[in-house]
Amino acid sequence: MEPIERGYHFDRAVWIILALALLIRVFVMVAVFSGDDYAFDDSAYYVSIAQEPWRLGIPADERDYDKAAVTVGPIYPAFLIPIYNWLNADIPAQTTLTRIIQAVLDVIVALLVYLIAYDLFGKRVAIIALVMQALDLRYVFMAGTVATETMYVILFVAFIWLYLRAVSSHKMGAYALAGVLLGVANLTRPVPLVFPLFLLPHVLLIKADRRKLLRGIGIMVLVMVLIITPWIVRTGIITGEATPISASAFVHFWMNSRPDGDLLGTEDSLALAALQDMGYGADNPHLDAVEYLAAAVLNILKNPGPFASRVITRLLEAYRQPYGTVILVPRGAGVKAVARAFLAGEASLWEVLSVPGFWRKLLMYIWHFWGLVFGTVGIAIALKRREWAGCPLAAWIVYVSGMMSMLLVEPRYLMPIMFAFTVFAAKATDEMIRAVQKRRLITQPEAGR
């Protein structure tokens, strides 16, 4: 990777786009979301931990160990602590403030996407990426949920930006800071725990001093491990097992290994499934991570073909559905059903247009498939031209797609990779614009003859 020598150029257009992005997000947080509606199933759990911060530590009494937080990382609940404890206001006001803060964080994500695209492909591509990221309603509504997504995305996008700068400059301090961001991102959601392994193709493909690059990545991984180890030790003391960040991934992997895994939505159904796979009755459902992992492997080995088919089908379905289309939309208010009725002559066009959330869903779908289609084209262009600088972004797409396909994948789990598609899609869009402009320049003199 060639050194990134150019400085960033922030002209008036960049600041106007960022200001517009902030206005859109704040308006949605205040006018669309309701302060007393978390808009997400797990939100109440995060808030309850924030209201009882001792649950993030090691309880003094072992009888309270079952109340300690072990299924989630500490960063997002810690972020909520000052809002839900120190702010002298009611829950709706506290929740609205949470959303506004996350709206600001999401604008910073848009800025970081601009910087990444600027480093990789120049200012023209960066402006396109910024516009699309700033106006992406998937991110706007994601920021409105009291959930880990926005915090996780900003930490990881910041990590990618800093990693690219570190590779270009060979500054070990930049690698160390990237390791801090990666460690904190893992403590938010432990998805990128082994992602550094997927950076090895980047090491092999780019033109750089590989010794310095490997040493830098080694420092980055070491710092990441130092950041996450205290939490792993603390959780191990409470649970009696060495679990990386949280144990929920093992449970989801086991559920995914069963044909009925996506139907196990209650404690009773989980306990019954555990009885079938591991011999634990409904009155003793306390399993450790190793048992979930072993049961999942056995289930897969028994029926590898159907498992592979389910994984691929669910992954494609998750890619087909943009994240955010069901947020704040009443159950049963689906666009697809009404659209089918319209095509069959059983519903009017007005009924289609009147479906709750129709217009924002339409925009979400446009942005979603623009990112996927043009992003794939952008990756193909980079591969054809042997432009390896963007390899970490492509590796992140492959890594998350593969990992999440093992864990009952849904659109929410794929959302953290959409920024990478946006950067590559901006590249492809710029190439298309250049091709059209070039063709016009060629045809104009001929038209004048």
Image (cartoon, helix red, strand yellow):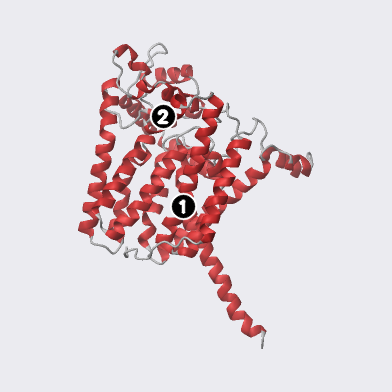
Quarter of the image with the N terminus is: bottom left
Label 2 secondary element: helix
In space, the residues marked 2 and 1 are separated at their CA atoms by 25 Å
Q: Residue at x 31, y 51 (%)?
A: 199
Q: Which residue is mark 2?
A: 77
**Residue 405 in sight here:** no
Q: Which residue is mark 1?
A: 111
Image: 345 above or below 74: below
- Whichever of labels 2 and 1 marks the residue nearer the N terminus, that label is 2
**Could you say where residue 382 lies in the image, as x and y percent from the top left?**
42, 62
Q: Quadrant of residue 167?
A: bottom left
Helix, strand or loop at label 1? It is helix
- Along the line of sight, the residue nearer the viewer: 289 or 293: 289
Give amino acid for label 1.
Leu
Q: Is residue 180 above or below residue 258?
A: below
Q: Is residue 186 or residue 243 the one in the foreground?
A: 186
Question: Residue at the spot x=62%, y=80% of the render?
Answer: 443
Residue 366 seen: yes
Left or right: where 281 falls relative to 41: left
Give the residue type that dot 2 points to.
Answer: Pro
Q: Residues within 10 Å of mark 2 (few under 14, many from 20)?
A: many
Q: Position of residue 137 (x, y in %)?
A: 57, 45
